[in-house]
Image (cartoon, rainbow, N blue to C red):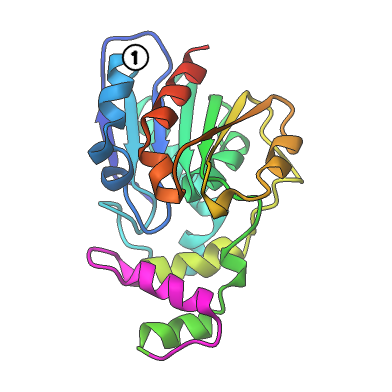
Amino acid sequence: MPLATHHFPTDTTAPPVILLHGFASSAAEDFIATGWIESLHRAGREVIALDLPGHGESPALTSAAEATTSAVLDAIASAIDTITPAGPIDVVGYSLGARLAWDLPRHSDRVHRLVLGGASPFEPFAAVDTTELAEALNGDTPAHPLAGMMAGMISAPGRDTASLARLIPGLASEPFAPEQQAPRVPTLLVAGSSDPMTQAIEALLAALPHGSLTHVPGDHRGALDSAEFRSCAIDYLAA
């Protein structure tokens, strides 16, 4: 499954930085339009921002097999190898991108350092009832508010609603289980000071053999856009 890639090369010997965006978003919305590319370039870093399957400019998901966590991670690793076929890489992931980046070292031995923002130790997609989600997309009021919230996210203008609806159960079929196998590479966790999604993030920190945690201003969206997040991520990757 090919992914859309946005490559911003520069003359450097440092590992390229891979950017993985959040659910129902895109590389353009989370990183390109928010100053991340310019900040990383000023730090002398080559950047590769990916659109996850069914997001942004990437192709639609046409089967359940393409929507599993393993399939998405394999697609990410393949896209990286196509753009930059050798050498170490650094990865910055946010929200869903952080959840995927946590497991990426098991699909690519090239990962050198990780910066994971807006990460939750819990699996949100397993709690979404697909029948209720379909009802909410048809305009009915679901019994569980989470289904309504997800329906609103994936039916927003510009979203590939069918692909995102397929991705929710696909990710849930291989739920996030951070306590089973944590990345062994140096990992920085970044949490917004008022982000409810990162409650209990200390559980992720405890699972990491080489982890650290920092808080930045903002809620789930504000933390991603904050200058403090970009600054601490760039400093960590340069260490």
Residue 115 position in % (x across, y down): 52, 31
Q: Is residue 54 magenta?
A: no
Number of dots carrying numbers: 1
Q: Up-down: is 164 above or below 108?
A: below
Please indicate whether residue 208 sits to the left or right of residue 41 in the image: right
Q: Up-down: is 155 above or below 42?
A: below
Q: Is residue 147 magenta?
A: yes
Q: Which residue sits at x=26%, y=37%?
A: 32
Residue 146 position in % (x across, y down): 52, 74
Residue 143 position in % (x across, y down): 54, 87
Please indicate whether residue 111 sits to the left or right of residue 58 in the image: right
Q: Amino acid at mark 1?
A: Ala
Q: Which residue sits at x=32%, y=12%?
A: 44
Answer with the quarter of the image where residue 13 lies: top left
Q: Which residue is mark 1?
A: 43
Q: Nearer the viewer, residue 202 or 45?
A: 202
Q: Which residue sits at x=32%, y=49%?
A: 26
Q: Nearer the viewer, residue 2 or 111?
A: 111
Q: Up-down: is 207 above or below 85?
A: below
Element carrying mark 1: loop
Residue 62 in view in this figure: no
Q: Nearer the viewer, residue 78 or 92?
A: 92
Residue 100 in view in this figure: yes
Q: Nearer the viewer, residue 54 or 23?
A: 23
Answer with the quarter of the image where residue 186 lies: top right
Please indicate whether residue 136 sits to the left or right of residue 39 in the image: right
Answer with the quarter of the image where residue 35 lies: top left
Crowding around mark 1 (Cα neighbors within 10 Å: few <14, some 14 to 19, many 20+) is some
Q: Which residue sits at x=47%, y=80%?
A: 133
Magenta part of the protein: which range? 140-161
